[in-house]
Amino acid sequence: MKAIKLNSLKNNNIEDIQFCQSCGVPLNSNKIKGTEDNGIKNNEYCKYCYENSHFKNPEMNLDEMKNNVKNKMEQLHLPNYMVQKALNILPALKRWKNKQFVI
């Protein structure tokens, strides 16, 4: 996950911004978007999670993603409330939504 400049989001409503459906990073430019096998940018997943039509870490579970997101955000010295908000949205993202209740 790459650091984003908060001011790069200031002209957009949060509702207008697409987020990676795996890690929650804002997909506010084509540079951050993952790719399909044919090189076309994917509009649902970032390049840190998805490349060539596959997840980079397909065995990862939600708890592992939460740890990765938390660690990266803490490395970026983001405020605790932002870290917690990011962690809270992860279970609702497409990649994790239907997997959290599997027994």
Image (tube, rainbow, N blue to C red):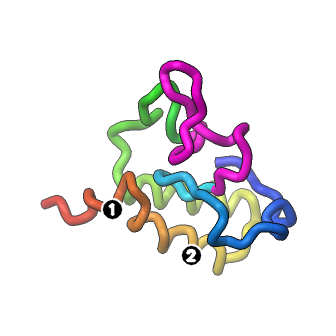
SS under mark 1 = helix
Give x and y (percent) for residue 27.
Answer: 65, 51
In the orientation shown, which residue stands out farthest toward the top?
38
Q: Quadrant of the C terminus?
A: bottom left
SS under mark 2 = helix
At 67% from the left and 71% from the top, the residue drawn is 14
Instruction: Return the disc, 2 or 1, that comes first in the chain's sequence.
Output: 2
Seen from the viewer's position, the closer of residues 97 and 88 is 97
Relative horizontal placement of residue 75, taking residue 10 as reference (left or right)? left
Seen from the viewer's position, the closer of residues 64 and 31 is 31
Relative horizontal placement of residue 1, taking residue 7 as reference (left or right)? left
Is residue 30 magenta-colored?
yes
Q: Which residue is mark 1?
A: 97
Give x and y (percent) for residue 45.
Answer: 53, 45
What's the residue type where badge 1 is placed?
Answer: Lys
Relative horizontal placement of residue 73, taking residue 50 as reference (left or right)? right
Do the residues under discs 2 and 1 have CB atoms within 8 angstroms?
no
Which quadrant would residue 70 be assigned to in this image? bottom right
At 79% from the left and 64% from the top, the residue drawn is 9
What's the residue type where badge 2 is placed?
Answer: Gln
At 38% from the left and 52% from the top, the residue drawn is 95
Q: Which residue is mark 2?
A: 84
Seen from the viewer's position, the closer of residues 26 and 56 is 26
Q: What range of the chain is rendered magenta?
A: 26-48
